[in-house]
Image (cartoon, rainbow, N blue to C red):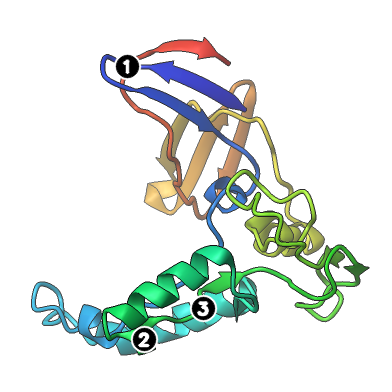
Amino acid sequence: MQRVTVLPDVIVVSAAGVGGGSLIYANTLYEPPAEFFADRRWSGITDWQRELAPCYAQASRMLGVVRQPSITPTDRVIRDVAEDMGVRDSFVRAPVGVFFGTPGHRVPDPYFGGAGPDRSGCTQCGDCLIGCRIGAKNRLDLNYLHLAERAGATVHPETEVTALRPTGGGRRWEVSAGSQLFRCDQVVLAAGVPARPATPVVS
């Protein structure tokens, strides 16, 4: 689903798809450095680096994080600038969620012991931000959602939720989506479309 929204000072092009923002993210998957976790604004709450370490490890495994193997012309410029500034060691290849393999060559699932879909090696075409026509980009429809469907879950694309109500003393939920009613134990809310009234140009 795609939409162009006209606001007083900006035009917002938004879209929704099975896989959410992972369909168009830039593939870069950095883990914050130690000083981020030590920031005094939140470090007193808990040891965030230790607390979140299992989460980063799981996300890295599911998204197949590797270092970008090649050096692009842009990389060379950034590396040269870092060297000129005397911080050559600060230049590193980005950690990305991409299957490289043999460019354009399709192979059986390389991540989940055959439980995932076939994948194709990255051709480095640079179209990551608008999706991946090759099948190399690691996104939710190729890992979590694919595995959930394989385990028996049903994905309902192009379904607009109109109401969410707690039931059973707050232990269960009812989710209304048009004429459909879903009942479940857990609900995850995740959205990224403009919330204020606007004029739709394309729907």
Read off the residue under disc 2: 88
96 left or right, relative to 12: right
Q: Look at the image and tell me in which quarter the C terminus lies.
A: top right
* Viewer-closest of 27 and 22: 27
Amino acid type at circle 3 is: Arg
The residue labelled by disc 3 is 93
Count the marks. 3
Q: The residue under label 2 is which amino acid type? A: Arg
Can the viewer see residue 200? Answer: yes
* 8 or 61, nearer to the observer: 8
Query: Under tag 2, what secondary structure?
Result: helix
Where is residue 107? Give x, y as percent.
Answer: 91, 71
Q: Are marks 2 and 1 in contact (CB under 8 Å)?
A: no
Q: Which residue bears the numbered disc 1? A: 7
Looking at the rendered structure, the kind of residue marked 1 is Leu
- Give percent across and percent down for residue 16: 57, 35
Distance between the Cα atoms at labels 3 and 2? 12 Å
Q: Secondary structure at mark 1?
A: loop
| Residue 100 picture location, percent across and down | 74, 73
